[in-house]
Image (cartoon, rainbow, N blue to C red):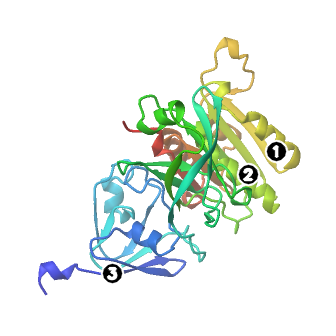
Amino acid sequence: MTASTANAGPFQITVQPSGRSFSVDSGEAILPAAIRQGIGMPYGCKDGACGSCKCKKLEGSVVHGPHQSKALSAEEEANGLILTCCAVPQTDVVLESRQVTDESAFPVRKMPSRVSSLEKVSHDVMIVKLQLPANDTLRYHAGQYIEFILRDGARRSYSMANAPHNGPGVELHIRHMPGGKFTDHVFTAMKEKEILRVEGPFGSFYLREDSDKPMILLASGTGFAPIKALLEHMQFKGIQRPATLYWGGRRPGDLYMDAWVRERLADMPNLQYVPVVSDALPEDNWTGRTGFVHRAVIEDHPDLSAYQVYACGAPIVVDSARAEYSAKCQLPAEEFFADSFTTEADKH
């Protein structure tokens, strides 16, 4: 057998402990093959930047495409960890990923959408509601995201801020990144009835309903969007697990749906809310918690060994929370679910 045919594929991927298996075509990375075949593996950015898809390789060999060392260090790779979004199998592979369940992921679809409303809720946050084709329901888990496909092929990812039962439209919370090709358009030229192409659903950020553990919901800025969808889903399904929402912003105005959260508290006795502001000015008259939002969790919960954490927002917040909760608060690594908003860097 020559070298050129030795690694031709297709190869079989098996994920333990669920036993799910799927095939990967020659030259294809593991994650896109899983998404294509409805296998719900964990992931975030899909391009080697966030580390959400990291898992343990038990058998087989892979070659990694380009990725950032903060997502997978050389030491982690030497210890058998891989990033499924850019790992191309050279043989059949067996992985360990406890987040893979027997439930199939919803199919990823492309569809046109129409802007049905625009509401500016703070100086730099716009709530955009999209209408989807009447005969075409977008099926998704509360917490997942869609991607806009721009005219030049570039993509921008935003989490659905409404649970599926509050459809059929989709609500998105878009932060203005000055100079950003997409968000400049949203805040200056976008009009109701504009047509945009979207694809989704993506992401493995959704409520694990097979657990009864108490939850920490951690949001920074517009990372609140998928957390809002989780809260709507919990209320709709009557899920009574204790949950504490920590929502952080630089100034009180960054907590742009604070009143909405406080209204939920009356209807959801299992929910607690801790707003945290890092850079309040005297004129804000802020009397609540201050500092970094992920640290407020550590102050209140020095032992997270019996919890699940759902985190969304700026990568620095999510990455710090993942590292510190595991190292300082005994949070099991497999109980940290994250969606790191790599779209905060809206490229020109």
Label 1 vs 3, first from the N-terminus: 3
Disc 3 is placed on an element classified as strand
- Residue 188 coordinates in the image, percent (x, y): 51, 30
Question: Mark on residue 264?
Answer: 1
Residues at marks 1 and 3, CA–CA distance in whole angstroms: 48 Å
Question: Mark on residue 171?
Answer: none
Classify residue 90 by image quadrant.
bottom left
Label 2 vs 3, first from the N-terminus: 3
- Are the residues at dot 1 and dot 3 in contact (C-beta closer than 8 Å)? no
Identified at 87% across, 48% down, the residue is 267
Q: Amino acid at mark 1?
A: Arg
- Are the residues at dot 1 and dot 2 in contact (C-beta closer than 8 Å)? yes
Q: Is residue 169 left or right of residue 334?
A: right
Mark 2 — residue? 231
Disc 1 is placed on an element classified as helix
Identified at 32% across, 77% down, the residue is 25
Residue 38 in sight in this render: yes
Question: Mark on residue 11?
Answer: 3
**142 vs 115, nearest the viewer:** 115
107 lies above or below 334: below
Label 1 vs 2, first from the N-terminus: 2
Residues at marks 1 and 2, CA–CA distance in whole angstroms: 9 Å
59 lies above or below 210: below
**288 vs 197, nearest the viewer:** 197
Q: Is residue 331 left or right of residue 9?
A: right
Q: Is residue 84 left or right of residue 39?
A: left
Residues at marks 2 and 3, CA–CA distance in whole angstroms: 40 Å
Q: Residues within 10 Å of mark 3 (few under 14, many from 20)?
A: many
300 lies above or below 254: below
Residue 202 in sight in this render: no
Outermost residue toward the front? 193
